[in-house]
Image (cartoon, helix red, strand yellow):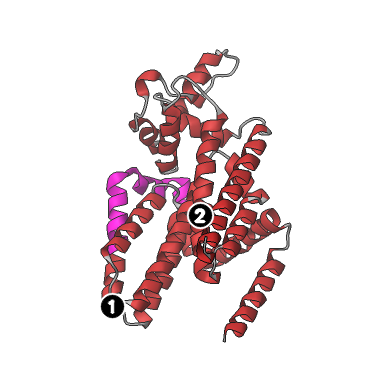
Amino acid sequence: MNRKSYKTFFLCLLTICYTLILCVVYIHFGHTKIGYDGDEVFSYMSSNSEVNYKELTALQDNSWYPSEYFHDALSVKEGYRFHYEIPVRNQATDVHPPFYYILLHTICSFFPGQFSMWYGIALNIILTLLSLFVLFLLLRLFIGGSFLPLTICFIFGMTYGVINNVLFIRMYVLLMLLVTLQYYLHLRMFLALKLTTDKFKFGQLILLALVTILGTLSQYYFLIFLFWLAAFFCLILFIQKKWTALFQYILTILISGICSVIMYPTMIKHIFSGYRGEEAAHKLVSIQGTFGDIREMFSIMSRQLANRHLGQILVIMLFWHFFCYCLKN
């Protein structure tokens, strides 16, 4: 076995070990989960109940409801397996887009008449592992190699913030995956454009459109991230005078938005009259509010990912990257 084959074998072995450890940790903490947040109950109701979930939650005082009433609301009935009209219709009366609930309904459809928190946790574990894989690809572009990015992803996956997200049966792990993937695609498109002519490949634009549509149909806050990312990306293309690429990019984003509306027209009402959409729109136009949210987000990340030492860690990483750059040059 030559040196390259040995490194590949060790990398694959390390990846399998890290993945198994993460799965064991997530399953362990899943067993410690007690009770459900109200939004987690709504996740199952929105995904599986053929009766409008808002009608189900409008319980009368001093009234008795048998356990079957709630069991039927949380599980998929035999005749409604893979009935995707259910989550789409239920979410039309709520404030969120339906993609996460479609995924949860798909898993629950394999177990008709049954309810378990593990359906949602299993979905979140899969989405988390996919997120870590995309993060691994992203880190390889920044710092090179494979072993250090893999270890960083493993450490990140073991943090309290990630574990907490795995156990919370909502769409936020899916949002993490799509945000990371969208950033990775933009970075790859930028790097590819430096090596090619003044245009993107058709496959790149298709992937960009797909992730944009899925992100929009997962959480409306994805649009805030996309707005600032797209604005910065367009500015770079404009400065570099990549006119064809700029036109392709803007057209792809516009087509993606139109397709999202066609696929889920209720999003127009959600964004412009629903409280979540109005909240997201307000944060989009409020620069002061945006920077305040960024500070709050950094504070939460520092507390949940690095025991309040995220700033120091980032400074150390910056100096280390600078040191490695000086050694190479």
Q: Say what amino acid the circle numbered 2 marks.
A: Phe
Decide which of tag 2 and tag 1 comes sooner along the chain: 2
Residue at 41% x, 27% y is: 109
Task: For mark 1, give the secondary structure.
Answer: loop
x and y percent of residue 106 in the render?
Answer: 41, 33
Specify the principal SS of the magenta part: helix
x and y percent of residue 18 in the render?
Answer: 60, 50
Residue at 43% x, 47% y is: 218
Q: Which residue is mark 2?
A: 133
Is 33 drawn above or below residue 3 in the view shown? above
The part of the chain drawn in magenta is 252-279
Is 42 drawn above or below residue 307 in the view shown? above
x and y percent of residue 251 in the render?
Answer: 27, 65
Q: Is residue 136 visible?
A: yes
Q: Which residue is mark 1?
A: 197
| 199 lies left or right of 52 | left
Other residues around mark 2 within 10 Å, as few (<14) / some (14–19) / many (≥20): some
